[in-house]
Image (cartoon, helix red, strand yellow):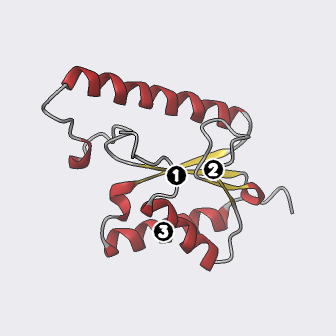
Amino acid sequence: MSNISGKETKPEILVRKFLFSKGFRFRKNDSRYPGKPDIVLPKYKTVIFIHGCFWHGHKGCKRSKLPETNVLFWKNKISLNIERDKKNRIELEKQGWVVLIIWQCALRNEKLKIQTQNKLIDFLSKQITPNT
């Protein structure tokens, strides 16, 4: 588990490259905010978390299936992650941030990736930009 990186993952890089190519500027892994969001778009008052389906307990996703060994450990680990995510989301929303979560499985193939990217751009283009 020590080799599992919490940042600079392939899904994060994919989303960041896409946003940058569309002209969006952001901060990455900014520790000033609860949960250290993967992407912070201050102009849009929006933060984005790119969650791994397994590590963050994506309900209904086949990639979130727990291993058959040491089940109690994994249930506890994932449930603590879910609780921490919820707490961070609530805190960010209290501070006036819009919190988006992109699941790893939404980027797994080209069709889903394009749909997710289009939804993201559509959402951001509708955001009110209070800092401009």
Identify which residue, 111 or 67, lies in the foreground.
Answer: 67
Taking the view exactly as shown, the residue that stands out farthest to the bottom is: 21
The location of residue 56, given as percent across then percent down, is 39, 39
Q: Quadrant of residue 91?
A: top right
Q: Quadrant of residue 96?
A: top right
Query: For mark 1, does the 10 Å Cα neighbourhood hold few (<14), some (14 to 19), or many (20 or more) residues?
Result: some
Query: For mark 2, does the 10 Å Cα neighbourhood hold few (<14), some (14 to 19), or many (20 or more) residues?
Result: some
The location of residue 48, given as percent across then percent down, is 57, 52
The amino acid type found where label 2 is placed reads Asn
Q: Are marks 2 and 1 in contact (CB under 8 Å)?
A: yes
Q: Quadrant of the C terminus?
A: bottom right
**Residue at x-position 74% and y-position 36%:** 95
Taking the view exactly as shown, the residue that stands out farthest to the front is: 2
**Residue at x-position 63% and y-position 50%:** 29
Q: Are marks 2 and 3 in contact (CB under 8 Å)?
A: no
The location of residue 74, given as percent across then percent down, is 27, 28
Q: Nearer the N terminus, badge 2 or badge 3?
A: 3
Q: Nearer the N terminus, badge 1 or badge 3?
A: 1
The location of residue 67, given as percent across then percent down, is 18, 36
The amino acid type found where label 1 is placed reads Lys
Q: CA distance from mark 2 to mark 1?
A: 7 Å
Whether 69 is drawn above or below 105: the answer is above
**Residue at x-position 65% and y-position 35%:** 34
The amino acid type found where label 3 is placed reads Leu
What label sits on residue 29 in the rendered view? 2
Question: In the displayed structure, does residue 123 sit left or right of residue 58?
Answer: right
Label 1 sits on residue: 7
Q: Quadrant of residue 16?
A: bottom right
Label 3 sits on residue: 14
Query: For mark 3, does the 10 Å Cα neighbourhood hold few (<14), some (14 to 19), or many (20 or more) residues?
Result: some
Taking the view exactly as shown, the residue that stands out farthest to the left is: 68
Q: CA distance from mark 1 to mark 3?
A: 12 Å
